[in-house]
Image: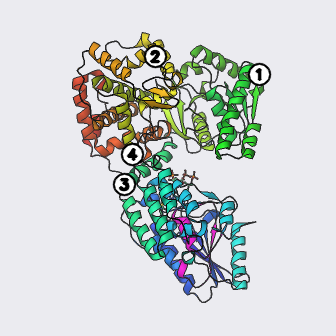
Amino acid sequence: MSTVQTQIDRSAAAIAVLTIANPPVNAMSMAVRAELLAAVSAAAADPGVQALVLIGAGDKFIPGADIREFGKPITGPSGRDVIAAIEACPKPVVAALGGNALGGGLEIALGCHFRIATPDCKLGLPEVNIGLLPGAGGTQRLPRLVGAARALELVTSGKPMAAREALDTGVVDEVAAGPLLAAALAFARRVLAEGRPLQRVSDRNERIAGTDPALFTAFRAKHAKKWRGLLAPQRIVDCIAAACTRPFAEGYALELAAFDECKASPQRAALIHVFNAEREAARIPGLSADLAPQTIHSAAVVGAGTMGGGIAMCFANAGIPVWLLETTPEALTRGRSLIEKNYATSVARGSLSQARMEQALALITGTLDYAAVADADIVVEAAFEDMAVKQDIFRKLDAVMKPGAVLATNTSTLDIDKIAGVTTRAGQVIGAHFFSPANVMKLLEVVRAAQTAPQTIVTTMALAKTIGKTAVLAGNADGFIGNRILAVYGRECDFLLEEGATPWQVDRALQGFGFPMGLYLMRDMAGLDVGWRIRQYREQFRDKTLRYSPIADRLCELGRFGQKTGAGYYQYDGRSGSPDASVEALIEQVARERKIERRAVGDEEIVTRVLTAMANEGLKIVGEGIALREGDIDTAYVHGYGFPRHQGGPMYWAAQRGWAEIHDTVSRMHASQGTLWAPAPLLAERARRSPAVVS
Ligand code: 3H9
């Protein structure tokens, strides 16, 4: 089936309308490129055609090259060939932009002589998110319209701009007042009637002339920490610098070389793996495709603590009115001021407008009365992590909530079946495990309990998308997906301390791998007392035959709870931690007590051991059906635990390393360390299959 249709509109002038239709999102596949080039060439050569309009089916413009084709042999014309034909066309070519005009799609539009967009169109170059840079002139043409400074921000962040900004900066010539095609045709007719000269962005130098090269050095320095180990952002700066300092042809050639370098890099493959895994995570096998999610018009949150407040903000940010239910007026006031403080910080930082803050705050209403929330479509309980407390809340909710409402618990440790068990509607009870800070962290672990109805699952998964979260479905078992692997991650780091590493060495090694923060800095920031309390409670259930590191407990016994007490694993001056000899002495003491001979531990050993243990645990989780697939674990880790996105997640890392090697390491560790390293039942079989090479 053809992906590009040409129709001639003959009202007043003969205008060829080229419609690109490539479901689901009109991505620029090889077929689209070939057919678009043919259609542009035909219209250019047709003496009966005076102008061209390029538009996407359903008014949705191209959101970039077809990601599914990366790694496959490329045939036919490139995006550059299509753009060259458009730019050289002697007749006006107008891009009619709606939906997402992104990546190669925006590059096609920038190759057109004129652009018109719908008011809600998003325009951007998001290639950096998948380890690439714009490869069809985006780094050369965009600065010519918006200037070097804004282009640097847009292309290295990958964030789109709104149509309004695009109009103000001249990226589009007009924002459509009515239906897009009609507006684009009217625009093209005006261009013809006025005899307006064709505008070729590649010829325009006024915005980039005289750019101070110091801008690029300063921009790199500003982002040095964030870009540590990343290839694409650095190359994007190279390309934009070239656009501003060299002739178009030279910059254009440099961009292609840089694009090819990024395309060949393992980072690109890992980032596309995560992109695909995120979308796969939304698909739940076994559920009927006809099952439509319930629309969530209103929500309620029980508990106005840090977590509850953050969850309420998620709803409000998405425009959903939300009740905040508490037990005392004081708790409500405290919760409300915490929310106001969080919003005010965003306004002060410039990431939120005062008007948006006021809109969001107006959507949050406090109440002390269960009856008030009865009509909410979903209620998320975010109370103290205590079974009796939660069961009491669910009894009360069961008594008042309207039939069909989703009853979600934000528990991170408790058995959801036991919570559902106190209600008369276990089918509507589900886990919605947010990560702290809930208004910032992208992950939502949706936890399916024994009786959770499919309808409740699809509704909660869809809601996650509405409130800007990436959802992963987990089974109802201790730690769900994320915290169960985190326990193994922490355990191996602690054992490595006993065996010879230091907290700062472990952190350095993990940060070297790409984690934004090492485990011990993270623990110190979160506070060590919370985990200590949980461990004290769980002590009665702990299998005393298994190795256990008491280092964290010992620190807590000394009152070292992390940043908030000025000392934890590190010694703190404000928020900056420095190594502490007394902690090293404490670790040595623990090693002596356990008769562990400390030795030199290398950074590479730390990373490999920790990730191998995580991957083995991940495979157990998949085998037990707690996670649906390996990609879900990667998605959870990238969005909830700071796993470096460009490393693809723990399961992807293992697949790249080769499951055979993981199997060898796990078997060796099992022989020397015992049960804690028992191989996942799926591991031997996974190792036999050839390692998955994802491109
Ligand atoms: C590029 O352009 C390089 C050039 O510079 C090179 C020179 C030419 N291709 O996200 P959704 C699928 S690199 C193929 O749930 P939304 C997606 O997998 C590209 N498929 O929808 C999913 O499939 P499924 C630069 C794509 O409405 C379905 O569409 N561009 C592509 O929330 C729905 O996706 C980008 O990086 C694609 N490009 O968001 C943009 N995009 O249903 C990447 C999506 O089977 N895409 N699909 O799971 C996005 O940011 C979002 O998908 C988008 C829609 C905003 C477009």
Q: Point out the tag, 3 or 1, that comes first from the N-terminus.
A: 1
Which residue is found at the position 59% from the left and 22% from the top?
A: 420
Direction from residue 401 to residue 476 in the image, left or right: left
Comparing marks 2 and 3, which lies closer to the viewer? 2
Q: What quarter of the picture does the C terminus occupy?
A: bottom left
**Residue 142 screen position, x and y as percent:** 56, 67
Direction from residue 144 to residue 262 in the image, left or right: left
Q: From mark 2 to mark 1, how far is it between C-alphas? A: 39 Å
Q: Residue 369 has which mark? A: 1
SS category of the residue bearing label 4: helix
Marks 1 and 4 close (CB-CB < 8 Å): no
Q: Point out the tag, 4 or 2, that comes first from the N-terminus.
A: 2
The residue beneath circle 4 is 647
> Where are the magenta residues, as a range?
86-115
Q: Amino acid at mark 2?
A: Cys
SS category of the residue bearing label 1: loop
SS category of the residue bearing label 3: loop
